[in-house]
Amino acid sequence: MKGLTKLALDIVMGAVVPIVILNNLTQPLGAPVAYVLAALVPVTYVLVDTFFISRRFNVITSYVALSAIMNGILAFWFVDGVLYALKDTASLVVSVIVFAGSLAIGRPIIQYFLIQALGPDTSAREAKLRRLLSLTQVRRSLALATLIIAGQTALAGAVNFALNVNMVTASFGSDLFNQQVAQVNALTRVAFPIASLAAFGLGFVFIFRALYGVLPRQEDKPQQEGDLWPLIDRWEPAA
């Protein structure tokens, strides 16, 4: 699934459908039922995509699936006020912990995203890619990219918490609570995926700049327009 199509589908299933449910099914179904249904739509979408559509099982997809399961469980924690703001921000807090924690242990998690994106098709290519990623200048770019994403996620978490505290003020189980949740979702579930995509994009700019800086040049193309795998195949690690 292409990037923009996937982003659009993520926004539709993560924002549009839940907002429609909260705004239109609260009275017919009752506020608590409509709230749970709206919360479970994105969870179901992620799990179906992971296990039945893409069917790719690795560190990244496992992390995404576990985050979705956590959100599904939290959907049944019926709270309001500050506790609701904390609950709605929990997945972002976990993401910050994962990204920052990977930096703390010296294994920037963005490298797994990169390996998944490049998709080495042989064990020899995978081994060579891992040696390439172990170079000092490349490691620095991986750490910088991970830091950028962790920072953006932390900022998103702070904004999300503040929006929920100030906008979701009604009691859980009321029609007004669902309306206020929908208003916050209309802001965050569209803006945050776009901001996250921008952070990942910026991070990968630094990573690919570092990679092209150590790989051999391709004579007939500018350095950063060459196909990466032929350059990696030609690269000879220092003894």
Image (spheres, helix red, strand yellow):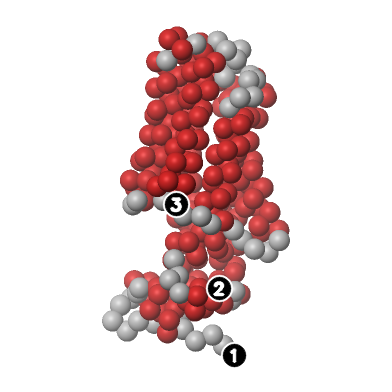
The numbered dot on residue 239 is: 1
Name the residue at 40% across, 28% down.
Answer: 17
- Does dot 2 land on a helix, a strand or a loop? helix
| Residue 75 to residue 230: above or below | above
The CA span between labels 1 and 2 is: 15 Å
Q: Which x, y percent locates residue 218?
A: 35, 81
Q: Amino acid at mark 2?
A: Arg
User: What's under tag 1, amino acid-wise?
Assistant: Ala
- State how far apart marks 1 and 3 are (Cα): 38 Å
What residue would you read off at disc 2?
Answer: 130
The local crowd at label 1, few if under 14, some if 14 to 19, many if 20 or more residues have their Cα within 10 Å, is: few
Q: Position of residue 193 (x, y in %)?
A: 46, 42
Residue neighbourhood size for the residue with mark 2, other residues' Cα within 10 Å, grouped as few (<14), some (14–19), many (≥20): few
Q: Nearer the viewer, mark 1 or mark 3?
A: 3
Query: Badge 3: how crowded within 10 Å, few (<14), some, or many (20+)?
Result: few
Q: Secondary structure at mark 1?
A: loop
Q: Which mark is residue 55?
A: 3
Query: Which of 85/60 is in front?
Result: 60
Three-letter residue code for mark 3: Arg
Q: Quadrant of residue 137?
A: bottom right
How far across and how far down the image is residue 200, in percent?
Answer: 48, 53
Position above or below: 20 against 95: above
Ranked by sequence position, the earlier of labels 1 and 2 is 2
Q: Given this view, does label 1 or label 2 mark the residue nearer the observer?
A: 2
Quarter where residue 230 is shown: bottom left
Instruction: Give the quadrant of the C terminus.
Output: bottom right
